[in-house]
Amino acid sequence: MEIRLAKTAGFCFGVNRAVELTYGLLAEGHKVATLGPLIHNPQAVEDMRRKGAQVVDTVQDVPAGCEVVIRSHGVPRSVYDELEARGIPYHDATCPFVQKIQRIAAEAEKEGAVLLVAGDKTHPEVQGIVGHTRGEVFVFADLAELERGTALLTPKNPFCSCTDHISGDKMERKFGVSQKAYTNARIFDTICNATWARQQEAEDLSQKCDIVVVIGGHHSSNTQKLVQVAAKHTRAVTVETASELRPEWFADVKVAGVTAGASTPSSIIEEVLNSMSAEINDNMSFEEMLNASEEKRVHAGSIVKGIVTSISANEIQVDIGAKQTGFVKLSELTDDSSAKVEDLVKVGDELDLIVEKVMDQDGVIQLSRKKLASRKGMEEIAKAAESGEVVEGDVTEFNKGGVVVNVKGVKVFVPRSQATMRRDEDYTALVGQHVQLVVTECSGRKIVGSINKVTAEQNKAKREEFWANVEVGKTYTGVVKSLTSYGAFVDIGGVDGLCHISELSWNRIKHPSEVVSVGDTIEVYVKDIDTENHKVSLGYKKSEDNPWEQLKNNYPIGSTFHAPVVSLTKFGAFVRILPGVDGLVHISEISNDRVEKVSDALKVGDMVDVKLLDVDFDKKRISLSMKALLNNDAE
Ligand code: SF4
């Protein structure tokens, strides 16, 4: 038995988009609810349910914490209003072809026109469309109904649009009738190619085959329509899964045709084909059969120019001068997951794009700007790898082995050892930074780079410049690179200078961390240079902050202080009158009474009033008196 698979079998563009969106959200761990079954296929819906997607009928039924996916059929405007009023996050997978009809409905309302819709008024897609106008609407399912309506209605400026659930041949006649009835009618041919092409191919197949097996949900209207079309010329049967196939159907069949509704996953089609024959078409795989049946007029890989014709939250539509509609997903416009489409492009922009996939049967071409940029980027990177030229890019992610840098749309891997100059540096902190690098390897898909090599070269140049210009007293803005018990190393432009602990503060400190931290940007000056050993000593504390200078300038002999006792000795107590400046209150200067032991009168931490008796600035000695103030009180 020869098996012929329809090239249009399986998911249409709109359904595929909704399914991909939902599986993507589930994979990212989102809680998802769909308004009605996402597609008309119980097995696929069950699979999504197992993965966590709940099906609800109304917005009120959406469980707390769930994000809603609006299926490809679309919903009335009131549903968006309700979702927003309740603050429920949603993802709109309404098929762009359906959105186009919804826009026509809204336009009809604006123009005060009656909207005539060819379709089934009970179908959710039709109900969704109708819900986008508050004006007068007339939905007709067949010619008789239109004619009856014609007799009843005398609409002004009617708009006539068709949903995708009306077969093509009837459309022609409906348009004819509506135009005859309403000579001023504006007719919009909105029937979706996917449906049209599926039905045409089913009819074609049925004329060449002894049986046509239609795979799809028993409640799917487009599957049932395919059965009806095929049954005009041959025996047509429908199955939801391979388990429903009956061997007796194929007893004397020489050629069997297989097609599938727009909601049928490829896994089910594959299962049915495998069950019908272990040896399909000389061992061609399912994928090969699908590819073989693709008739591509615009080829995948072609570079085209596209004019942006409309934009929505997740994608843009472009006109590439072909009869198919071009789409570019947001993820194919940019790598920035937080970017909004409207910030990237606007209607009328001309974009350079590459064709990713031609879906002739759906009248759709998927394009990418990112991949084209990446292809051009690849060429530039190959050249840079050869010449050793420095390139620039943004660090987008890290993993155990290193970081990934996006250079002109191409992912360049930089191993950890090549990402930072020191092994203990946190290489993950590079994520989000714009960096310079050289490409060290570019073979096939393996593109490796080094940030270190560029940093090392830059540091070398900076060092040479530093040693050519450094002089004692010169100030630098540096970054604290590391701390030791004896000081802080400060990078002052490719050279690390040491700021000794005694140069960090006028106070006595136990560790440099009391004053600076690694990563601090500080002002330092050169205290000493050892050109032979390439060593620089730095100073941080400033002379104007020197407390001895402050004492000299602001506190004449006789000044008084209210200050803490910081230590006791046999012969007196030290009192800190300024930060880093301690003066001695001799035991004889503590009180008018005789003090036997200093600790009888004072303890560390006491706050005392003292008078400045004398200062020896050379020996840095200060004499203080408590008694002198007591005498004053007595006077
Ligand atoms: S059948 Fe057409 S309009 Fe409907 S979802 Fe599929 S591509 Fe969109």
Image (cartoon, rainbow, N blue to C red):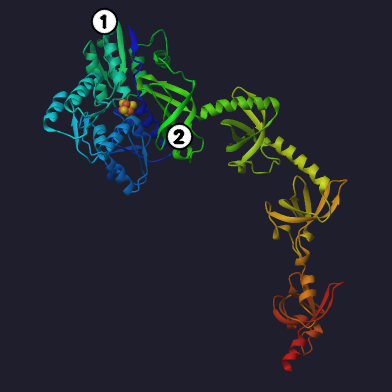
Res 101 quadrant in image: top left
Mark 2 CB in 8 Å range of ligand 1?
no
Residue found farthest to the front: 184
Q: Is residue 222 left or right of residue 388?
A: left
| Residue of label 1 | 252
Question: Of helix, strand and loop, which one carries label 2?
Answer: helix
Q: Is residue 206 visible?
A: yes
**Would you name the residue on which mark 2 appears?**
330
The mark found on residue 329 in the picture is none
User: In the figure, 404 relative to 9: above or below?
Assistant: below
> At 39% from the left edge and 36% from the top edge, which residue is drawn?
312
Task: Please say if 209 is above or below 539.
Answer: above
Q: Is residue 347 above or below residue 320?
A: below
Q: Residues within 10 Å of mark 2 (few under 14, many from 20)?
A: many
Is residue 43 at least partly visible in the picture? no
Q: Which quadrant of the frame does ligand 1 lie within?
A: top left
- State which tag comes first along the sequence, 2 or 1: 1
- Residue 433: x and y, percent? 61, 42
| Front residue of 362 and 570 | 362
User: Disc 1 marks which amino acid?
Assistant: Asp
Tell me which residue sits at (62%, 27%) in the image.
Answer: 380
Q: From the viewer's side, name the closer residue of 99 and 209.
A: 99
The x and y percentages for residue 261 are 30, 22
Left or right, 441 with respect to 569, comes to left
